[in-house]
Image (cartoon, coloured by chain):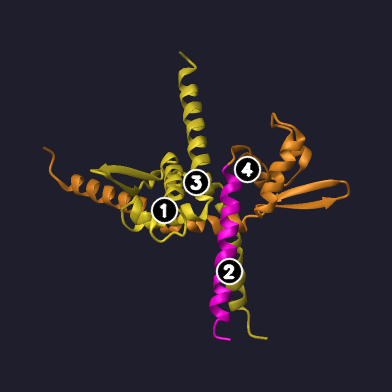
Chain colours: A yellow, B orange
Amino acid sequence: MTDVAPCGILNRMVEYQRHVDAVFAAIADPTRRAILARVARKPATVTEIARPFPVSLNAISKHLMVLERAGLIRREVVGREHHCSIEPKRLRDAVAWFDHYRMFWEDRLDSLERHLVARRKRPHS
Amino acid sequence: MTDVAPCGILNRMVEYQRHVDAVFAAIADPTRRAILARVARKPATVTEIARPFPVSLNAISKHLMVLERAGLIRREVVGREHHCSIEPKRLRDAVAWFDHYRMFWEDRLDSLERHLVARRKRPHS
């Protein structure tokens, strides 16, 4: 019984890794990022989503499938239409990955701020 | 001359898109994320980076090349050794992409907070 808890944690970590893999792979494509921006503005049908893109409806359907598998969009079937809307939870999980690296640029900004404050305090030469 | 400025903006947007594509594709792989975490802790040689991974040095070299092309690591040749360190600028640029979507989860947290505050104010039933 003792290994139940670590196994649970490990499983959740593996699951998190898989989700993050899928999210980053999905948003590595500019068309998929544009589709996500479209459905974030307003839920839409597949035809509405495809309209402004200079590619086939079939290509857009494939992109939507990648986004759906990554858990980034939700699809609801209403009659004959598929309504797509954004599912932000996985985006929030993925952005958390960057938190480990934030100190690199935040530290740099702090240094820059200190430098500018020090310069302002110095008498004009 | 009038189209110089919009062209400049467009070029920068295209360049930003390409950088973001490369960053997300690079970090979509768990081994590359682990390599990045390793060099973020401390700059290291290729051999040092490869040591804990159960894959060949050649495989690690390929992952490093992807990270380098995405602008996420910097490689300096010192004598016969390649020293790799993190280059955080592109990560900062990529994380900015999530800002458009932040309102989705922050709004939800705000709603939750409002709900909890309202519940706390209500007399116990």
Say few, some or many: other residues with alpha carbon within 10 Å of mark 2 (under 14 / 14 to 19 / 20 or more).
few
Tag on residue B37? 4
The local secondary structure at tag 4 comes to helix
Which residue lies at the image location 48% right of the left edge and 36% below the top edge?
A16
Q: Tell if the residue under mark 1 belongs to the same chain as the one under mark 4.
A: no
The local secondary structure at tag 2 comes to helix
- The chain identifier of the residue carrying mark 2 reads B
Which residue lies at the image location 43% right of the left edge and 42% below the top edge?
A65
Please report whichever mark, 2 or 4, sits nearer to the chain's N-terminal start: 2
The residue that label 2 is drawn on is B12
Which residue lies at the image location 63% right of the left edge and 43% below the top edge?
B37
Residue type beneath disc 4: Ala
Q: Position of residue A25 (x, y in %)?
A: 53, 45
The residue that label 3 is drawn on is A26
Q: CA distance from mark 3 to mark 2?
A: 23 Å
- The chain identifier of the residue carrying mark 1 reads A
Say few, some or many: other residues with alpha carbon within 10 Å of mark 4 (under 14 / 14 to 19 / 20 or more).
some
Q: Is residue B20 visible?
A: yes
